[in-house]
Image (spheres, grey):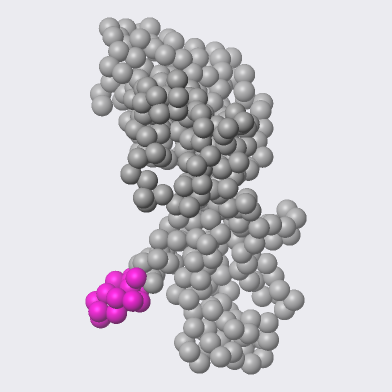
Amino acid sequence: MNLAEKVQSLPLTPGVYLMKDSLGHIIYVGKAKQLRKRVQSYFYNNKGHSPKVVQLVRNIRDLEYRLTDTEFEAFMLECQLIKEIKPMYNKKMKNPLAYSYISIRADRTGRRQIEVGYDPGPPGQQLHFGPYTSRSTVERAVQGIKESQRILCSSPHTGHSLCLNHSLGLCIGMCGGGEALDTYNIIMDRIIALLDGSDRGILNDLEQRMGEAAERFDFEAAAKYRDYAGAVQALLQKEQVSRFTGENKNIAVLEPVDEHTLKLILIKGARILFRTKLDISQPDMKQLHRTVLAAVTAHFATAASELAEEISRHTIDEAQIIYSYLKSSSGSYLIVPQEWLGGKPEPLLEEAVHRLLEDYFDQ
């Protein structure tokens, strides 16, 4: 069967496709909700493809695929295969530098500064946030924060004279010391609170500036503050994902396969521990409850002593998939606290599993 025939024969179901070159090497791994439609999109109506995708297509000579029961599993399998195989074009289509951090460091005068870099530095020496997968988003967000709070100082290390940006209204004057430095420290505390998710006041400031600019018909300024606000929101989302990953949560997911079949997926952190299909053509709720409860108790209790894996780009990608799924899902999920996993089933766990099943069938 040639490549065109293989593409045409692909099923319209979820799965992962593996593109191969003339030597049989896997050069790209992708996922799809409907395999045939996704793979066909590489070869038809391809005028909108990026140069990297055009180059990829020129090198495809064969493909294989792996079916999954659900789209969520296809996302997770794609991440796993990219981590294992490291295909050439998956690497080409991503920033070669893994991720960026925002660090709060004290300069030689003791004043806290915001820095963006690829290395957070030794642990304990400064406060840092991240990792973030888009350097440009981080830099745009930091620029917007500094500009909106008027701490865009052009001489941040002087401590005795005002900088040029102060005369332009971009700096409150902390470069000259005095009361402005006290105000600067209050602003830095607000920035830290924004990044750790405890205070969204600065984001509200950006959105207010956008609205004010639009009201006075300054659409260029409104667009700028809209972009700044969007970048900050993206940062906060990534920070939530990083914290979510580090917490190594126990998550039980129920996802539909079809009208007769349900998929139970147990996840710890960003790793799938266990999955199984459940027949719901004629659901016996008591039996389903026993099955789910037994799986949750056995697999999460066994994995209780495992540490969260080191946060890498792949871990973040996997966590992003899980986090996004939980926030907007066609299925139902339950986060299981470790203290519910004692020697015998906890009443709280039994009740939570009962609610999980009820939520699923009530959708």
The x and y percentages for residue 349 are 46, 21
* Residue numbers of the magenta segment: 208-223
Q: Judge whether residue 71 can be spotted in this image.
A: no
Residue placed at 29% from the left, 76% from the top? 219
Q: Residue 159 at what x, y percent from top left?
A: 67, 86
Give 359 or 237, whichever is nearer the viewer.
Answer: 237
Residue lying at 36% horizontally and 17% vertically, measured from the top left = 262
* Left or right: 289 in relation to 188: left
What secondary structure is the stretch in magenta mostly built from? helix
Residue shown at the point (54%, 37%) measured from the top left: 28
Q: Is residue 254 above or below residue 196?
A: above
Q: Quadrant of residue 243?
A: top right
Tell whether 122 sits left or right of 319. right
Q: Is residue 209 magenta?
A: yes
Residue 244 x %, y %: 53, 41
Q: Answer whether residue 36 is magenta in the image.
A: no
Q: Residue at x 59, y 20 (%)?
A: 301
